[in-house]
Amino acid sequence: MKSIEVTLVYPTGTENNVKGTATYTVRLYFAEPRIDVKAGGRVFDVTIAGRRVLEDFDIARETGGPRRGVVKEFENIRLGGSLTVEFSAKKGSALICGVQAMIEE
């Protein structure tokens, strides 16, 4: 399993409003960059903060082919000062293009 950890940085002036954990909406950005990877060629699970959010995720299948993007959004993710996203490859290797975390009000 591979993982990435993102430190959350708050806009200036909001530091005092965020104490301990908070609830976030997390967006994950994916695109299959290789034209030779077809549906079924890259399959993986994704876990955010200990919660499995995608199972058997296949970018090419989801988007209809390579070089097309998709954004997956997950609400009500409880986080402290960092965000951990874990990937478990089932076929090929896991891939992500971007991560966005927005505090929910």
Image: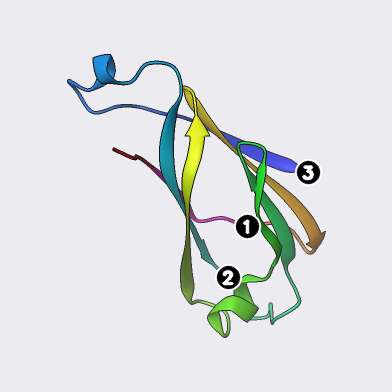
Query: In the rendered structure, which segment of residues is drawn in magenta?
Result: 95-101
Which label's residue is closer to the chain start, 1 or 2?
2
Position in image of residue 55 (x %, y %): 71, 61
Q: Residue at x 61, y 71 (%)?
A: 59
Q: Amino acid at mark 1?
A: Leu
34, above or below 101, in the image = below
**Picture coordinates of residue 73, whole percent (x, y):** 46, 57
Q: Position of residue 7 (x, y in %)?
A: 46, 27
Which residue: 51% across, 76% down? Answer: 67
Q: Secondary structure at mark 1?
A: loop
Residue 80 place in picture, x, y as percent: 49, 23
**Marks 1/2: CA–CA distance:** 8 Å
Left or right: 31 with respect to 104? right
Q: Which residue is mark 1?
A: 95
The earlier-in-sequence mark between 1 and 3 is: 3
Above or below 28: residue 31: below
Which residue is labeled 3 in the image? Answer: 1
Question: Please, is residue 82 above or below residue 68 in the view?
Answer: above
Does the magenta-highlighted stretch encompass residue 4? Answer: no
Outermost residue toward the left? 13
Magenta stretch: residue 98 in it? yes
Three-letter residue code for mark 2? Glu
**Which label was assigned to residue 32?**
2
